[in-house]
Image (cartoon, rainbow, N blue to C red):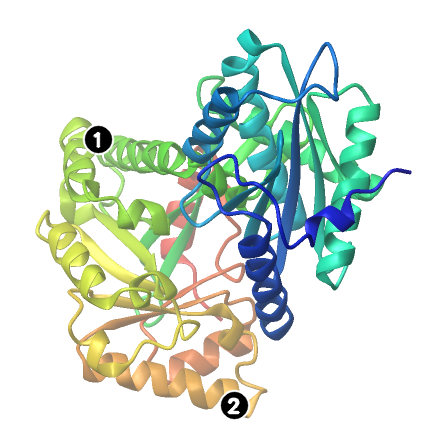
Amino acid sequence: MKTKTKKFIKTEMKQLTELPGHVLFNDALNKAISHAKRHRKIFAVLLIDFYTLQDVHLPIENNVLNKIETLLTSTLRTEDLLAHFEDGEFILLLTDIKKPKFASIVAEKLLQACETSMKDFSLAMSMGISIYPDDGLSLEDILKNADATLYKAKQAGGNQYQFHTPEMDVEAREFIKLENDLKNAIPNNQLILYYQPKLHIKKGNIAGIEALLRWAHPTLGILNPAEFISIAEDTGLILQLGEWVLREACKTNKYWQNEGYEHFTVALNLSPKQFQHPDIAKKIAAILKETELNPQYLELEIGESTVMSDVEFAKNQLEAIKSIGVQLSIDHFGAGYTSISHLKQFPISTIKIDQNYIKGVPNNPDDSAITNAFIGLAHHLGLQVVAEGVETVEQVQYLTTQNCDMIQGYFISHPLPAEKIVMQFKKLMDRALF
């Protein structure tokens, strides 16, 4: 099999575009290898080849190369590193991707963009994808395998991408199909909300209810967020999904109130991208007005790691959202190491202790000690505490002795669709905990 690896490490080559060349790219790739090895990360290298349909060996004109460069850079993120090696061959470094198959999202975007813009030039495009560390631990191996995979993609007919291993190729195709299905989930009315109550421990009544997203996939059945949220986040669909959840939860809670059920808050999680959106407060206010739900009956949960990524920005965002009149809570508390000085600055009313700590209560001394400290800290700051992931009577008894305010988890109820959860309202409010 023909390989082009040697050309990657040439010391001289005419640069035909304004993109970085092989020297800068190889330096960046070596740094990416060191970073990934040290932090146990993965990254992808995409070797991209443009060639004329009439003759694959015919050089591509410089003006066309410049158009290709503009197209590629406009499609990619600013953190992606694109370099030009020679003639119609480019190489792309995607650092810190969460899973190898996520590289297929970028590959699909590039294929679609080039199919639209390059057809007038009679060009074909193929890509070979190599993943660190699965497909190589050194610069030479990563580039060699990307080149070999590119060769397979061209031999298969071009205008496509391939991963180095057939198993990864199959997984990526299934992932992309799921992504395309997700784009149609809202217009096809496939999204549904399940609801899980939060119970006030000492009073034994419903303190609120959390809305949880589910996807009724036409062939795969009911999917939990863990099976598709990462796709939504990486494709930008998360904003659309998040807005749907917000509107549907507010609309349902208002309907329950109109039907005469007890008024309580409905809580839902704001994704990091939603929280970081500059107009999120305006969007929330508009949906509350549209659904006619009083803001005091909406609670928004923001992950601890989200607020800690930029404390000053988070403080401003929280204050803007709080000004609407909604309630705010920090979700997964204990997972992101929020400092006390920051916690007291946020306009929140509740913390939800991460379920990883609750799992160990009361048998694990460390988890119990940390949970006790969280409860004491929150109460000292005038905050309420929710323990999430509560599953056993022993956990409930222990949390009661520690003056935890609320519990949520399978011990109370599994998440249920709206039509089923309403049947649980009276039962849950009257139920003794033990």
The quarter holding residue 287 reads: top left
Percent from the top left, x then y, of residue 334? 41, 75
User: Residue at left 45%, top 32%?
Assistant: 75
Going from the N terminus, do you reach mark 1 or mark 2 first? 1
Can residue 107 be spotted in the picture?
Answer: yes
Which amino acid type is marked by label 2? Asp
Q: Is residue 219 above or below residue 205?
A: above
What's the mark number on residue 211? Answer: none
Q: Where residue 310 sits: x, y (%)?
A: 27, 64
Name which residue type carries label 1: Asn
Image quarter hosting the N terminus: top right
Label 2: state its secondary structure. Answer: helix
Quadrant of the rendered structure where residue 175 is?
Answer: top right
Drawn side of residue 238 relative to residue 151, left or right: left
- On residue 366, the disc is 2
Whether 71 is drawn above or below 157: the answer is: below
CB-based contact (under 8 Å), mark 1 and mark 2: no
Image coordinates of residue 196 in percent, x first then y, are 44, 50
Residue at image position (11%, 50%) is 325
In this image, 203 relative to 427: left or right? left
Q: Looking at the image, is 134 positioned above or below residue 288?
A: below
- Decide if residue 97 is in sight here: no
Question: Looking at the rendering, which quadrant does residue 344 occupy?
Answer: bottom left
Identify the mark at residue 258; answer none if there is no mark. 1
Q: Is residue 61 left or right of residue 204?
A: right
Residue 8 place in picture, x, y as percent: 69, 49
Q: Residues within 10 Å of mark 2 (few under 14, many from 20)?
A: few
Front one among 430 and 251: 251
Residue 415 higher or lower than 351, as above or below: above
